[in-house]
Image (spheres, rainbow, N blue to C red):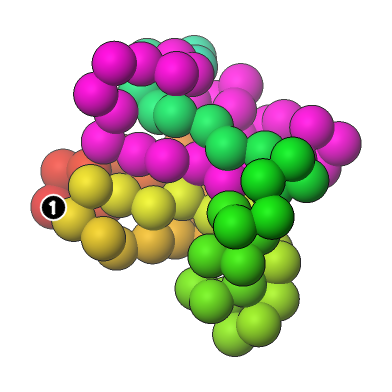
Amino acid sequence: MANSANPAITMYSTTWCPFCIQLRADLDRAGVEYTEVDVDRDPEAGELVKSLNGGNRVVPTLVFADGSSLTNPSVDEVQAQLAS
């Protein structure tokens, strides 16, 4: 669920990205809590995403509480990362 009090995940996304829209729906359906940051509205977030993806602003990029990240993951990959 987006914008929870203490999420374990920050999802960097855009409003227009079909992969972001799908992952958002999948995470919501699975009950996975996350905070969402729109890289179109937050240039610093866009730079962070680029630093995690070899200079490319690829979304969705998820950053976990432990500092690890996944780019364009499936909901199963997200849940596996949270379980590890």
Q: Nearer the viewer, residue 74 or 49?
A: 49
Residue under numbered circle 1: 84
Does the magenta portion include 75?
no
Instruction: Using residue 66 as the reference point, say whether residue 11 is left or right of it.
Output: right
Q: Residue furthest bottom?
A: 54
Instruction: Give SS at disc 1.
Output: loop
- As displayed, is residue 68 above or below residue 34? below
Q: Residue at x 42, y 40 (%)?
A: 10
Q: Position of residue 17 (x, y in %)?
A: 81, 42
- Residue 44 appearing in the image: yes
Residue 53 figure quarter: bottom right
Instruction: Using residue 39 as the reference point, say whether residue 2 is left or right of it.
Output: left
Q: Residue at x 79, y 32 (%)?
A: 15
- Image quarter (top left, top right, bottom left or bottom right) of the N terminus: top left
Q: Residue at x 16, y 43 (%)?
A: 83
Q: Residue at x 74, y 40 (%)?
A: 41
Q: Position of residue 58 (x, y in %)?
A: 69, 63
Instruction: Using residue 83 as the reference point, say whether residue 49 is left or right of it.
Output: right
The residue segment tinted magenta is: 1-27
- As displayed, is residue 53 above or below residue 16? below
Does the magenta portion include 15?
yes
Three-letter code for the amino acid on which mark 1 is drawn: Ser
